[in-house]
Amino acid sequence: MSIEDLPAFNASINAVVSLLLIGGLLAAKAGRLGLHKGIMLGATGLSAIFLTSYVIYHLKHGSTPFTATGWPRYLYFTILITHVLLAAVNLPLIVMTLWAAWKENWARHRKLAKWTWPIWFYVAVTGPLVYLMLNVWFPAA
């Protein structure tokens, strides 16, 4: 795998994480806590791989300009800015939510997860959208 492959790899990881998050939520709501734990640890592990790959890519490659104009540009930057801001908030939320589970503080875990899950899901879904807009739907000419 080359450095140029990392954006597609990262988008794929985020897409899988979004599916795992849905599965983890459904498992928790069904009371299948062992399954929930396994799924959420999988989502966490993949997110850690994503973050490592993302940092490596941007250290080596830098940023890619979005060159489309008009409504695609406004949509892209709206999604990108909200994605980046929420991703920054998300990392400490995930750590705090996992820590509460590790300590078996289930009341705190559930309280944090009510914030963490939707933000994490939004970040996981919008990551591939940013990739698609930048590289597939509106690539630089």
Image (tube, grey):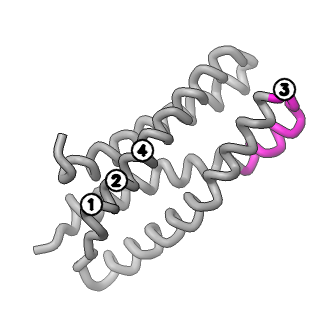
Instruction: Please identify the quadrant where the N terminus is shown.
Output: top left
Gap in angstroms between the C-alphas marked 1 and 3? 40 Å
Viewer-side label of 4, 2 = 2
Q: Amino acid at mark 3?
A: Glu
Q: In x, y percent, where is residue 65?
A: 26, 75
Q: In x, y percent, where is residue 18?
A: 49, 40
Q: Secondary structure at mark 2?
A: helix
Residue density around tag 4, few if under 14, some if 14–19, many if 20 or more, within 10 Å:
many
Q: Amino acid at mark 2?
A: Ile
Q: Earlier in the sequence, mark 1 or mark 3?
A: 1
* Closest to the observer, 2 or 124: 2
Numbered label attached to residue 60: 1
> Which residues, given as a range, are shown in magenta?
103-115
Residue identified by numbered label 2: 56
Residue density around tag 2, few if under 14, some if 14–19, many if 20 or more, within 10 Å:
some
Gap in angstroms between the C-alphas marked 4 and 2? 10 Å
Q: Earlier in the sequence, mark 4 or mark 1?
A: 4
| Vertical relation: 93 (above or below) 17 | below
Q: Secondary structure at mark 3?
A: loop
Numbered label attached to residue 50: 4
Gap in angstroms between the C-alphas marked 2 and 3? 34 Å
**Do the residues bearing badges 1 and 2 touch, measured as CB atoms within 8 Å?**
yes
Q: Amino acid at mark 4?
A: Phe
Viewer-side label of 2, 3 = 2
| Vertical relation: 116 (above or below) 89 | above
Gap in angstroms between the C-alphas marked 4 and 3? 27 Å
Numbered label attached to residue 140: none
Which residue ends up furthest to the left in the rendered image?
141
**Do the residues bearing badges 4 and 3 touch, measured as CB atoms within 8 Å?**
no
Residue at image coords 42%, 46%: 52
**Do the residues bearing badges 4 and 1 touch, measured as CB atoms within 8 Å?**
no
